[in-house]
Image (cartoon, rainbow, N blue to C red):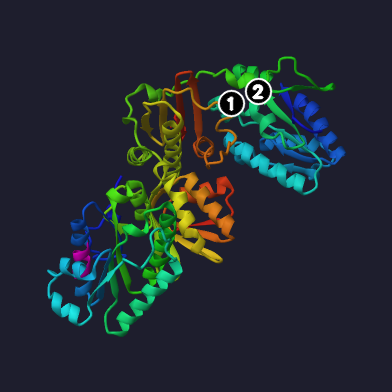
Amino acid sequence: MSGTPDHVALCYADDTELLGCGVPFLTDGLDRGDAVLLALDPPRAELVLAAVNRPDKVTVVSTNLQYVRPAVAIKSYSEMFAQLIDGGASAVRLLGEIPELALSTAWDVWARYEAAVTYAYDRFPLLSMCAYDTRTTPAWVLEDVAKTHSLVAHPGQGNLDNPGYVQPLSFLATTRPVVPYPIQAGPPAIELVDPTPAEARTAVTTLAAASLRPDDLDDLVVSVSEVVSNAIKYGKPPVTLTLWPGPHHAVVTIHDNGPGPTDPFAGLIPTPTPTGGGYGLWIAHQLCHHVALTRTPTSYTTRLTMGDPHHP
Amino acid sequence: MSHAAGRSDGTTASGPGHLCWAFAEAGEFVTGAKRFLVEGVAQGKRVCVTAPGDVADLARRFADLPDFDNLRDRGAVRFKSLDGLYGTDAVVDAAEQVRTYAAETEEAVAAGFAGFRVAAEVTNLVRTPAQLDAFAGYEHAVDRYMAAYPFEALCAYNVPVLGTAAVDKLASMHPRGNVEGVPFHLHGWGQAGAVALEGELDLRAHDLFPWALDRAAPQWGPGEVVLDARELTFIDHRGLLRLAEQADRRGITIVLRTRRFSAARMVDILGIAGVRVEQVA
C-alpha cells in the first residue's frame, strides 16, 4: 500500500454488522503483520476484541483522548503512526469511531477532518476504517460520511469502491452554514473594531475571566491573539472582534472582509511558511474546544469556542 | 502599548542601571545624563561622560553639576571624547569594549568608589547597518556584564540622525530607558549569565525579535541558558519558534521561566525540543 491512504466507511446498524466488517478487517491486518489499532468506546472495543483471534496484538486507543477535537486527533495519530513505522511496522490499520457527542455538537469540524484524512495521513501506509452507528448517528452526518470515504465496508463482501465519494477539495469547498449559538443572539460583552492583538487579549482576559478556568482562559487568549494577528496580516479591514462570555463558556468571533485562507485544510494541518507563520489557526484548533470557519469571497469569520455553549 | 516597567527619566531608583536614552537635541542628552550622573555620585560611584567633541567643551556643559570642581579633583567625574576612539564606519569590538569597561569598573572600585557609571553619546557608533548590528551585540554583552558587576550606563542615541526604527532596535537591547512603545526588552539578568525578557512578543515584535535574538543569542551558552520571562506578559507561537531556532542553531537548551500556562502547552503542541518551559509563580 502506498500513496493515498485508504479510507473506509463502516456504517453499521447492529453489533453483527460491526463485527461482520470490523473483525475481518482487523484479522486481515494481523495476518499481514500490520500494526493494528482499535479506537472504539470501551463496550464496543471489548466486543470486537472478544471476536478477534489475537486480541493481545491489537493496540487499544482511548477515544476520549484521541478524539478530543480533529486537529488534536490528526497530530496525535500522526505521531502514533510515525512511531509504529519507525518501530518496524510495514503498514498501519485503524478501526475507529468518533464519539457520539462529537457527532452531535461538532460535526462541522469532524466532517472537515474526514475529508482531510487522506491528505493529513498521506505519508503513512495506512488503512483506516471509520465506524458509524446508523441507529444514533444523525442523517446529515451519514450524508457527509458517504461523501468523505473512498471505500464502503459491506459484511461478507469486503471494502467496495464508494460511488458517492467526493474529492476532498470539492467537499471542503462547499462551506456548510455555521449555526450560531443561542448566546450569540444576545448582546455581546464587547465588540472591538480593528483591535491590536494586545487589545484583543486584554478584552478577552478581562471579560471572560469569570467564565473559564485559568488554563482555558489562557488558551483562549492565545488563540484570539493568533487569529487577530492573522486577520491584521492577511485579512481585509475592518477586523471586528465580538465576545460573548457565558456560564462556563466563552464564544469569540473574529471577522474581516477578506476571503479567508485559501488552504482548504486551514487549521487542521499546519502550513509552515519560511517566515515562521502558518501555525496560528492550527494552534487555535489545538487549544479551543471548537473552531468554526465561515467564508464568502468578501467575508471571513473565525469563531472560537471554549467550553460548551450547548450544555453550559 | 507602553511598558511602564521599562520607562525611565534618567534615574534608575531600583533595578537595572542600563538605560537607552533617545534624544532629539543635544540638550536633552545633557539633561538625562546629568540626572543619571548626580544619582550615581550620590551612590558613591565614579561617573564618566563619553561623547563626541572636545573634552573641555564637554566638561563645560556639565559644570553646573553640584560640587563639580571637587568631584573632578578627586576623580569622581571624568570626561572622555569619542573622537578618534573609532574610525568612521568602524564597527565596535564587543569583547574588547566590555574588557575596557570592566577594567575601568575595577579601577573605580579599587579607588574606593561604589561602582562605575557612564553616560555615553554613541550615535556615531551606530550610523551604518553593520555598525548597528555590531553595537547591538555589544549592548547585550555589556548588559550581561552590568547584571553581574557594579557598572552602569546611559546610552544616548540621536533619533533624528538614526531614525526611530534603529533606536527602537537598540532600545529592545536595554532593560529600560525613555523609548516608549518598544514591544520587549531583552537583557542580562543576575550573576549567573541568565537573560531576561520583558514586555510582550506578538505581531509588533515579529521583525524586531528575530533581529534582537540574532544579536544576543551568539553569546549564550554553552548548555542551558535561563531566559527569565516572568515579566513577559505574552509570547506567540512565532516567538517560541524563534527561540527554538536559536537553541537548535547554537546547540543550547533555552529554559523559559514564565508565569503563563500557555507557553508550555504551545511548546508541546509545536513539538519544540530546544526550549524547556518552567512555570513559576
- Dot 1 lies on which element? loop
Magenta segment: does it hold B146?
no
Is the C-beta separation of discs 1 and 2 under 8 Å?
yes
Q: Mark 2 lies on which chain?
A: A
- Dot 2 lies on which element? helix
Tell me residue B108's x, y (percent).
Answer: 30, 80
Residue bearing mark 2: A168
> Can the viewer see residue B274?
no
Q: How far apart are marks 1 and 2 (CA)?
A: 9 Å
Tell me residue B278's x, y (percent).
Answer: 48, 58
Q: Where residue A264 is drawn, which disc sits there? A: 1
Q: Nearer the viewer, residue A234 or A57?
A: A234
Magenta span: chief secondary structure: helix
Quadrant where the C terminus of chain B sits is bottom left
Tell me residue A296's x, y (percent).
Answer: 48, 18
Q: In which quarter of the image is residue A212?
A: top left
Count neighbours of disc 1 (C-alpha within 10 A) and say few if under 14, some if 14 to 19, many if 20 or more. Answer: some
